[in-house]
Image: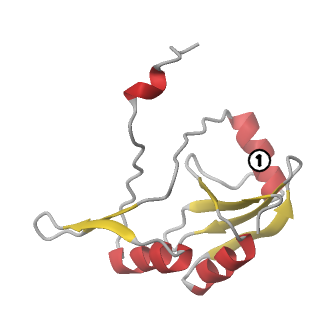
Amino acid sequence: MPDSNANDSILELRVAITTSDYERLLKFYCTGLGIEPAQFWQNGEGHAAILNLGRATLEIFDEAQAQTIDEIEVGQRVSGSIRFALQVPNLQAALERLLAHGATLVHPPIMTPWGDYNVRLQDPDGLQITLFQVQGQS
């Protein structure tokens, strides 16, 4: 097992998404999830933004576990090797905002065996996203 102080070696997780439609994807995540960008910058002709998404964790699944999660949330194996799972305080409100900003519904909300309320979406570029609300939150 890793050293118990291993968390001291990682200070921040950043996931970088490259898109052919920067403004569309920025609006999807900022307006759709109500996120205020933390930083904008340009290097040459390009544009970039940093969005703070709260606490970050990295989940690593083998194919069997990915199959199980997809079957629970969608009914069949559909996700690629990377899928976001974002905890939101109000799943229905977040779902409606994201659908209004270009999300595609992959599967309607379900109650998971572990008690979370989950919904599977795709962002405008096709990245799969699970929104989840922990039971008892509203």
Is residue 101 placed above or below 29 in the rendered structure? Answer: below
Q: Please indicate whether residue 47 sits to the left or right of residue 86 in the image.
A: left
Indicate the position of residue 27 as horizontal and vertical percent values.
43, 80
What residue would you read off at disc 1?
69
Given residues 138 and 2, the one toward you in this image is 138
Name which residue type carries label 1: Ile
Is residue 117 placed above or below 113 in the rendered structure? Answer: below
Indicate the position of residue 123 as horizontal and vertical percent values.
55, 70
Indicate the position of residue 91 as horizontal and vertical percent values.
72, 70
Indicate the position of residue 57 as horizontal and vertical percent values.
55, 42
The quarter of the displayed image where residue 36 is located: bottom left
Instruction: Give the secondary structure at mark 1.
Output: helix
Given residues 85 and 24, the one toward you in this image is 85
Q: Residue at x 43, y 74 (%)?
A: 25
Is residue 90 placed above or below 67 in the rendered structure? Answer: below
Residue at the bottom extreme? 100
Given residues 28 and 87, the one toward you in this image is 87
How many numbered marks have been drawn onto this rendered protein structure?
Answer: 1
The quarter of the displayed image where residue 134 is located: bottom right
Residue at the left extreme? 44
Q: How is the image coloured?
A: secondary structure
Q: Residue at x 85, y 63 (%)?
A: 110
Which quarter of the figure is the N terminus placed in? top right
Q: Residue at x 54, y 66 (%)?
A: 126
Q: Please indicate whether residue 2 sits to the left or right of residue 120 in the image.
A: left
